[in-house]
Amino acid sequence: MSADRTQCIISYQISGLNMKILVAVKRVIDYNVKVRVRGDNTGVELANVKMSMNPFDEIAVEEAIRLLEAGKASEVIAVSLGEEKCTETIRTALAMGADRGIHVKTDAELQPLAVAKLLRAICEKEAPDMVIVGKQAIDDDCSQTGQMLAALMGWAQGTFASKVDVVDGTAQVTREVDGGLETVSLSLPIVVTTDLRLNEPRYASLPNIMKAKKKEIVEYSPEDLGVDATPRLKTLRVEEPPPREGGGKVADVAELVDKLKNEAGVI
């Protein structure tokens, strides 16, 4: 092998191994649990309810670990923001393969802008090359944090990603758009938000679950990061959607058109 080719290979490996990935994970009600509204209509019932990692964030963790296993990243850091029990979500990410965790501990209600500001503060401390987050959380469906973080950092963003590849300091992100798929080439550092079709998350093995208990989790507060996490929006009332009415049969096209026009109001 020539000296030039050897130098080229070493250069590629070093540049790949220097990439640090930050993954944000959120603790939400498990997707298999039926959500119930509190009796006073101030929110949803969280007492004695099974909680787990947001499914879109699981996909984000899996993608980060795949990049790590492919030799395109040197470290994966899992970050969660919220109450003390969020450490359980971080441990899940560590058991999947993340290297270490960061917990921003607060009992305050965290809204997308506050989350984006907290993640920006962590990015300034950790200097990651890529931040991967789920495109949305299944509890509020906001789909705002990734875009807000990219704007605050002044970074490129690849949203609704169904495929991610990193080559020579450039990320090729295939996005799901209304007309099909769109592939964009983005220079690092970037923010990626994951779609459902990006990958299939792995299950954590028992040995990895045991190893995760020994991995480091650093704790901060919003005050430590210089961020005011006070909510900017107030939820006035939460109600369950009205029950759906059963369907019916129509005798002819005329009756169908009449129902669509006068009852459904769609024509």
Image (spheres, rainbow, N blue to C red):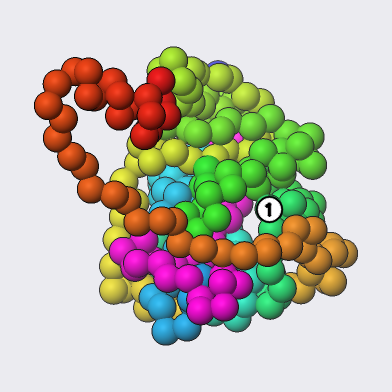
The amino acid beneath tag 1 is Pro
Q: Residue at x 36, y 34 (%)?
A: 263
Tell me which corner region of the image, top left, top right, bottom left or bottom right, holds residue 231: bottom right
Can you identify the residue that label 1 sits on? 112
When the figure is inspected, residue 103 is found, relative to residue 193, above or below; the finding is below
> What range is drawn magenta here?
14-43
Disc 1 on helix, strand or loop?
A: helix
Residue 225 visible: no
Where is residue 97 shown, x and y percent of the image? 42, 60
**59 or 265, which is in the foreground?**
265
**103 or 195, which is in the foreground?**
195
The quadrant of the picture occupied by the N terminus is top left
Where is residue 191 shown, x and y percent of the image? 63, 39
Q: Is residue 163 magenta?
A: no
> Which residue occupies the extreme bottom position in the image?
48
Q: Residue at x 76, y 73 (%)?
A: 221
Q: Residue at x 12, y 26 (%)?
A: 251
When the figure is inspected, residue 222 is found, relative to residue 200, above or below; the finding is below
